[in-house]
Image: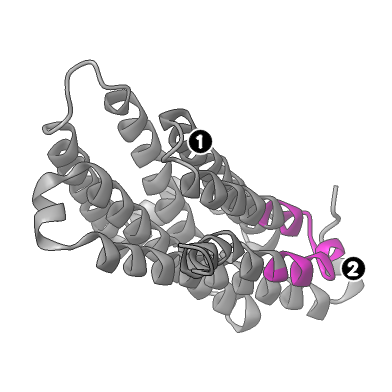
Amino acid sequence: MIGDTSHLNITVLRFAKPIPIWIMMAELLTVRTSHRSIILIIIGLAFGSLGDILLELQSYSFALFAAGALSFLLGHLCYVTAFLQICEDIAEFTVSIREVLQKKALYIFLWIIFLTFSFWSIGNIMAQLSKDSIMNYILPVYGAFLVLLVVAALFFLFTTSKIGGFALRSGILFALGSFIFYASDSFLAHGKFNDSYKGKVNESANAAILMVTYYIAQYLLGKGGLSIATYFHSLPPKLTPTNE
């Protein structure tokens, strides 16, 4: 094994994964004063980066896997809060969830689809877990926040649909990023706990799917932040929200 650098190269590659996320965070830092939500998006990316590192270390301890899941959960919560803060500041009139549900049949249809799929997906995994597994508690909680991320992104998209321009562009990017994050985390959960899934998709293929979808999701969420920053910069000074 002396002189064999393959193991070292793999290790370096694994821990270099967060670097593109850090680059996106640095880009967002340059526009952080445009709106209070930008800081939350940066923190969300930071939690995702930390979660990614912790998941790479999960072979040493299950606690590191749980900590990684918690880090991603906190990142999702930051994104959800950012989406709602932006909605509050850019809506031409007060928009409530009730109004969106009344006027947007597609919104409630997609909500039902994601809730149904989430119940099926989590239930499918939990059926294979032992009764005393802590994952019986982690999966439903994490799944709820993941659905909340998608629902909040859709709410943002429907809110910005009447505004257009960079606001709508950010809504599309946030929605796509949230959808793909949902898919990425689903691949992760099934690849780790679902024996049926593992029998159909080998570990290497699933790892590649996870990496691609994770990068795409975080990139889209970061670009959504940059788009909404451009929108706020384009507003006349009197219409620009404060960062309080």
Which residue is at 18% across, 32% downward?
A: 126
Residue 34 located within the stretch drawn in magenta: yes
Magenta extent: 23-41
* Residue 64 vertical placement versus 107 (above, below): above
How many residues crowd mark 2 within 10 Å: few (<14), some (14–19), many (20+)?
Answer: few
Name the spot of residue 138 as percent of width and height, x first: 36, 29
Name the spot of residue 237 as percent of width and height, x first: 91, 71
- Direction top: furthest residue: 132
Callout 2: SS: helix
Q: Which residue is mark 1?
A: 70
Quadrant that contains the N terminus? bottom left
- The kind of residue tagged 2 is Lys
Name the spot of residue 105 as percent of width and height, x first: 28, 61
Q: Main secondary structure of the magenta part?
A: helix
Position of residue 73 in the picture relative to residue 91 (left or right): left
Which residue is at 78% across, 67% downward?
A: 26
Which residue is at 62% across, 84% downward?
A: 165
